[in-house]
Amino acid sequence: MFQLPFPLRDVTADTGAKDLGDLPEWDLTDLYTSPDAPELQADLDWLEQECAAFAADYEGKLADLDAAGLLECVQRNEKISTKAGRVMSYAGLRYYQMTVDADRAKFMSDCQEAITNFTTPLVFYSLELNRIDDDKLAAMQAENADLARYKPVFDRTRAMKPYQLSDELEKFLHDLSVTADAWEKLFDETIAGLGFEVDGEPYNIEGTLNFLTEQDRSKREAAARELATVFGANIKTFARVHNTLAKEKEVVDRWRTMPTAQTARHLSNDVEPEVVEALRDAVVKAYPKLSHRYYELKRKWLGLDRMQVWDRNAPLPMESTKVVDWEAATNTVMEAYNAFDPRMGEIADPFFTKGWIDAGVKPGKAPGAFAHPTVTEVHPYVMLNYLGKPRDVMTLAHELGHGVHQVLAAEQGEMLSSTPLTLAETASVFGEMLTFRKMLEKAETKEERKILLAGKVEDMINTVVRQIAFYDFECKLHAARREGELTPDDINDLWMSVQAESLGDSFDFMEGYETFWAYIPHFVHSPFYVYAYAFGDGLVNALYAVYEENPEGFQDKYFDLLKAGGSKHHKELLAPFGLDASDPTFWDKGLSMISGMIDELEAMED
C-alpha cells in the first residue's frame, strides 16, 4: 500500500475563489516521467526478478550467515524497499492529486498488487531474522561496523518477535493486505466525491470545512449543518469502513496475542506505552486550564451566551478577513526558517523552486496536507490545499518542516531514515513555532499580538487537546468493536462522549455533530496515530524553551537530531538538550507554555 509517513493532516482550506498568485504544482518526473515510462516498467521487472532471487538465496539460511553475509542480505533487502517505495510513491502521489480519476486509482492498485505479489516470498526475512540468537547477532554487529549501523532496524524488527506468526500465516496476511487497502480507498474516494451546498453554491469538503473559520456566523452555521446533513446521508458507508477495519485489526491483534489495540502502534513507533499514557493523562488533566479556559475567553470575545460547534474555529471579532497570497506565505515561512539558521532556508528553497509542492485546491484532489519522503535517493513532496488563510501559512510551515527533516534524515539510507512517532512531528511543529514567533515579533499593536496569540493557542489546542480526544475516541471505538458490530449510533455516542469533556462547558452541540468523526482520515489510514501531534507539540514546546534559555549551539544539536532520522531512540536524541520524554513531569513543561499564552490573553482583558 502507498503509505504516507503521516496521515493526511486535518486542515481547512477555502473555495479557491481568491487570487493567490502562482500556486505551484508537483513535478513528479524526478520519480518517473509517466505511468508508462520504460524506467518504471524496468523497476517493476527488476523487483520481480530480485525478490525471487533474494528468496532463493536466503530463505532458510539467515541463521547460518556470517557478519559479511548478513550485511549483504540486509543491503539487498534495503534496495528492494527503495525500488518498491519509488514505484508506490509515484503511483500514490498521482492518485492523491486526483482521487476520483479511475485510471489513477487503477494504476495505483495495479502497482500495489504487483509489488505485494513480488514481495510475498520475502516474508521469511523478518521471521528468520528474529530467530537468530541474540548473542550471535550481537557478536556479528561487534565484528562488523557496517552491520552494526542497522542495529536500530534489528531492534525494531525483533520487538515484534513475541507477536510473530508462522511463516505460512505471515505470507497469508501479507497477501491479504490489499483488501484492507480497498477499504481505505473506499473511504478516500467517498470523501473526495462528497458534494455540499452552502447558500445555494456547490463545494467540496475542503471548501465547506473552510466556512467554519469564516467571520460570518450564519455562514459557519450553514456549513456545519450541511456537513452534518451530508455525513448523515453517508454514515452507513463510514460506519461499515470503521467496523470492517477495526474488526480486521482485532482479528490480527488476537492472532498475534497483542495485549492491547494500541500495542502495534507503540511498537512501530518505538515508544513505550507508559510514555504515551503519561502524555494522555497529562493532557486530559490539563483540559480545564487549557481548552475549557480558552473557550470561555473566546465565548466572551464573540459576545455569545453559549458557544456552538461552528464557533470553535471562528476568527476573533477584531480579526480582519485577511488573505495571504502564496508569495507572502512563502516569504513569511522562509524568513522564519532563515532567521533560525540559513541552512534550514537552503534546504527548504528547492521545495518552492523545483516542483516539490502541490499547493492549490482542485476538484478531486485529496483534502488536507502531508509531506511524503518518497525514497532517500529522490526527495520529499509536500501536498497542501492552500487558499490564503493565515492558518494555511502555518500548515505550509508545518509540512515544510517535515520536508526539511526528511531531506536531512535521507543520508541515513532507506532503512534508517524513517523517524518513529516519538520524533515524527518535531521538525514540523518546530517550523510552525519559528514562523509564529517571527510573526509575533513583527506585531505592531496589542490587538495584533492578541490575534496572533489567540490563533496560536487555538492551533495548539487543536494539536494537543483535540488529538488526545481523538485518541480516546479511537481507544473506545476499538474496545467497543471487540464486543461486537457497532451501529452508526454506537459510534456517534462514542464520539460525543469525548467532545464535551475536551471542549468544556462553554459549548452546545447541534444535532448532527455526532457524525463528525466520519471525515477524519487518521482513524482509517493510521489507527492511534493521532497522539503523534500532541507528542510533537509537547516535545517542541520543551525544545523551544531550551532554545530560548540557551540558544548557543542549539542549531547544531537540532540539526543532529533531524539528521539521525530513525537511527536513535528518543531518549538518546533528547539527552543533549537535557530532556527526557519518559519523565512524568516532562509533558507538564510543554502544556505550561500553552497555559502561559492563555494567561497573557486573560491579562489583556484587565
Image (spheres, rainbow, N blue to C red):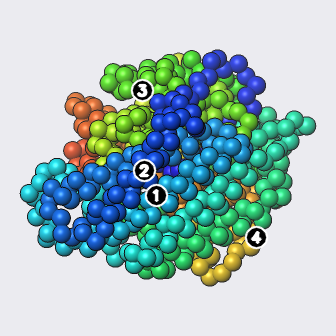
Q: Amino acid at mark 1?
A: Phe
**Whole-Å distance between the Cαs marked 3 and 4?**
46 Å
Mark 3 or mark 4, earlier in chain: 3
Q: Residue at x 60, y 29 (%)?
A: 359
Relative to 164, is 191 above or below?
above
Q: Which residue is mark 4?
A: 489
Q: Which mark is residue 348?
A: 3
**Whole-Å distance between the Cαs marked 1 and 4?**
42 Å
Q: Which residue is mark 2?
A: 47
Q: Which residue is mark 1?
A: 118
Relative to 440, is 42 above or below?
below
Seen from the viewer's position, the closer of residues 15 and 495 is 15
Q: Which mark is residue 521?
A: none
Q: Amino acid at mark 2?
A: Leu
Q: Amino acid at mark 4?
A: Asp
Indicate the secondary structure of the residue bearing disc 3.
helix
Q: Position of residue 339 (x, y in %)?
A: 37, 22
Identify the image quadrant of residue 103.
top right
Q: Residue at x 84, y 54 (%)?
A: 229
Q: Is label 3 in contact with label 2 (beta carbons under 8 Å)?
A: no
Mark 1 or mark 2, earlier in chain: 2
The C terminus appears in which quarter of the rendering? top right
Mark 1, other Cα within 10 Å: few <14 / some 14–19 / many ≥20: some
Q: Is label 1 in contact with label 2 (beta carbons under 8 Å)?
A: yes
Indicate the secondary structure of the residue bearing disc 4.
helix
